[in-house]
Image (tube, grey):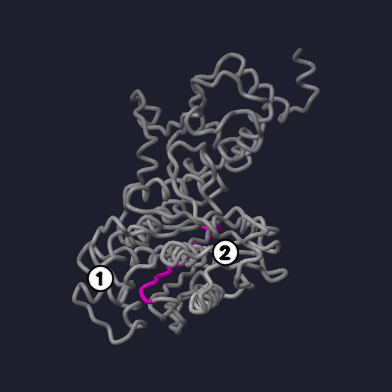
Amino acid sequence: MSMTPTKEREPHVNISLDLHRKGAPQFLAAKISTGIAEGITSFKLRVRPGRGVCYPNICVPIAGIIDYFTTEHGCSFFPAASWRNVPVLNQSGTLRPYAHDPLASPVTHLNKVWKFSSDDHHDVVHGIIGSMRRAGEMPQGVLQGLELALYEVTDNILLHSQTEANSPSATGYVMAQYHKSEQRIAVAVFDLGQGIPSSLAKGGIRASSPSEALGVAIQRGVGDGAGAGNGLWMMERIVSRSSGSFELTSDGARYAVRHRQDSEVAAPAVSSVTPFKSGTTLVDFQLHTSRPLDIQAALDTDPINLWIDNHLVDLPTSSNQPNEALLVSVAKESRGCASRYEAKAFANMAGNLMESAPDVCILDFNGISMVSASYADELLMRLIDRFGIITIIQRLSFKGLSPTNAAMFDRCFRGRLFGPSSQRESR
């Protein structure tokens, strides 16, 4: 929101941020602290021209810093015109993080900063993963790897960020983006807890420096005793197998690994940063979506994919057919059947499920009274383009189509296959 005339006349500090710089959150915190020291608690936020693009590793800590100073110091923050004119900032929740609302209509969880606690942790992460499944075509293993890493890293906050394990006051901030043109997923998770060095020390692991503590923290089975100690290790292995990158920042130290080539064994780079308060931790990681991700090779085991398990149904046994299939309820998992936009999102989700398992996939249209021609056309063509007509014939089937909806799909398919003339001749 913009400042009211009354607020405009009150003493306030103007803060101009360059969101392309990694130090933007620290710069923001320093300006706020200086203002508070001078007795000022109102701040007007500006964005430098051409510097309004905001990625998770910047948006998330900025949101956490603003939320902290609002809650702990009673500060007020107002966007200037340069801030309001950047859509990603207005919609990202950087000024006021999003919170899970079970009564709200379904919305995408991507490109938004979410504040979570133990009460809504599952709902927030589940929403992010669900939105990612609809966002684009993902190779095998990528979505499972993202889900495993994201649950582990966010759960770390609930387990380890406070001096009391599983403290009800533990909260974190998370944001995820899908960059289709760059073929990557970007995620950042942030908290204002006790920090990794203090957490490890509580478990009897004392490092000589924050930098050493970060290197120890990503090792398997290392933690403060409140959990298995595999969260950061799992994230690192998944990112490395994806030839992605990650940065772990806590208590003034940054541990970064960036893979620039598929076969590269990347060496970690350690550097110092200026924390705005002790105990803050930022986990920033990216996965490539241009290649499959071998989860079994990454983790030396084959974890259960609950998304697949929740869609598996038994089929009548036959010597010529498989005994399991993936069943997708269109009524539950497609947000309407009227637009090409929704057909594209549903085709991404159904196609990503088919990519994750070799089974037959059944699209169940029970409960769907009407499918528009544009929805039917977009859904069919996207799946055929992705898998090819032979694979679609072998692996995809439709269930519960009303005669009207069946005729709609048939007309769209014949129109694509033979052109508009075939539809005129069939009348």
139 vs 48, left or right, is left
- Is residue 284 on the magenta stretch? yes
Quarter of the image with the C terminus in it: top right
Q: Amino acid at mark 2?
A: Tyr
Earlier residue among tags 1 and 2: 2
- Is residue 198 on the magenta stretch? no
Q: x and y percent of residue 365 in the render? A: 51, 23
Judging depth in this view, the residue of 171 and 288 nearest the camera is: 171
Q: Amino acid at mark 1?
A: Val
Q: Nearer the viewer, mark 1 or mark 2?
A: 2
Query: Quadrant of residue 220 in the image?
Result: bottom left
Q: x and y percent of residue 261 in the render? A: 53, 72
Quarter of the image with the N terminus in it: bottom right
> How far apart in space, not on screen, are marks 1 and 2 (Cα)?
30 Å
Image: magenta residue range: 278-291
Q: Which residue is mark 2?
A: 55
Q: Give me the disc on residue 230.
A: none
Q: Secondary structure at mark 1?
A: loop
Residue appearing at x 34%, y 62% in the figure: 157
Residue appearing at x 47%, y 33% in the figure: 361
Q: Main secondary structure of the magenta part?
A: strand
Q: Secondary structure at mark 2?
A: loop
Q: Is residue 426 above or below residue 287?
A: above
Query: Quadrant of residue 8 in the image?
Result: bottom right
Q: Which residue is mark 1?
A: 222
Residue appearing at x 52%, y 41% in the figure: 349
Contact between marks 1 and 2 (CB within 8 A): the answer is no
Q: Residues within 10 Å of mark 2 (few under 14, many from 20)?
A: some
